[in-house]
Image (cartoon, rainbow, N blue to C red):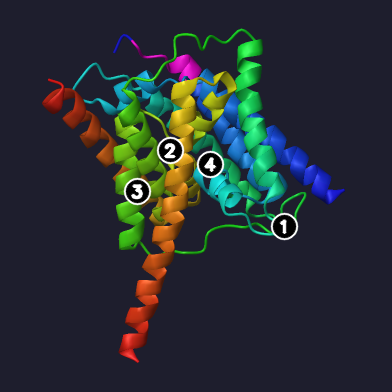
Amino acid sequence: MQVKRGLFSAFATGLLFGLGLCISQMIDPAKVINFLDLAGNWDPSLALVMGAALGLNFFATKVILKRPAPLFSDVFRLPTKQEIDRKLIAGSALFGIGWGLAGYCPGPALTSLSFVNFDILLLVGAYVLGTGLGVLINKSWKDQKADKAEAVF
Amino acid sequence: MENFTPVSALVGGALIGLSAALLLFLKGRIAGISGIVRGIIIPEQGDFLWRLVFLAGLIAGGVLYQLAGGDVAHIQAVVDKPLIVLGGLIVGIGTTLGSGCTSGHGVCGIARMSPRSIAATLTFMATGVITVFIVRHIIGG
């Protein structure tokens, strides 16, 4: 029963998320790029999208995390890492470059599969391939770290 | 600023925030799209199906928007195919190395005041702005 409720929650929250991306027009890459274009015809809409989403989630998260556990699961699964490392910054810097180039971050790219055309397929295909490459790079990064750690001892 | 659409931005943003809050409240998970997708591409046992169902919901949200009369006909890629591929590829690599994207870091991580997410969001916003500046005003200008 808990599994079914969990899956229903996943579908419902996915649907809300996709709807929010559509209503806010974040699925329009022209609008995203106009937000990033501070020196051009700047469109601040996306700042309000982020502001509303973050503002609501900020207060909700405070209340929710006071509970011992989520409603349909045993534990909250949150990232525990605190350290700001080079991989985080390098990866995020790369992500921003890709976002600025095509105007798509992952959420809008995937939601756009609902009116799929060849460009969207290309984009999502490249994104999936990039994620696979990222996983491989992640592994070799970890191996290098392990080698270095070994060299110390 | 004639393209500014504050009402739809606030309403859509609130729905995104509500979605993230509900996923945490109901299932205890972070609504980080790139992280959810990564777990579909590289699946772990017992931690796969909900991700697929979330993704189906995300696409269903787009379908529902169109059924309700939302217009997507005007939406098209703003760059040529090689740049679309390059952009998608870099977003995939970057979000994997950087452990998150606009949603996971920007909406969920900052909400928990995670220093990593604050650093990541500042970084990708900055390189996004710089990239658009170079493409539009230096190369394109």
Q: Tag 3's secondary structure?
A: helix
Mark 1 in CB contact with mark 4 (< 8 angstroms): no
Q: CA distance from mark 4 to mark 2?
A: 16 Å
- Residue type at mark 2 is Ala
Mark 2 in CB contact with mark 3 (< 8 angstroms): no
Residue occupied by mark 3: A92
Residue occupied by mark 1: B46
Counting residues from the start of the chain, the first of labels 1 and 4 encountered is: 4
Residue furthest to the right in view is A1
Residue B43 left/right relative to A86? right
Place residue A35 in its image quadrant. top left
Place residue B60 in its image quadrant. top right
Q: Which residue is at a point 37% across and 19% down the rendered structure image? A: A31
Residue A22 left/right relative to B126? right
Q: Nearer the viewer, residue A96 or B18?
A: A96
Residue occupied by mark 4: B33
Residue occupied by mark 2: A126
- Residue type at mark 1 is Gly
- Residue type at mark 3 is Ser
| Comparing labels 1 and 2, the label whose residue is closer to the camera | 2
Read off the chain for label 4: B
Magenta stretch bounds:
B3-9
| Comparing labels 4 and 2, the label whose residue is closer to the camera | 2
Residue A83, relative to residue A36: is it above or below?
A: below
| Comparing labels 1 and 4, the label whose residue is closer to the camera | 1
Read off the chain for label 3: A
Tag on residue B63? none
B7 is within the stretch colored magenta: yes
Read off the chain for label 2: A
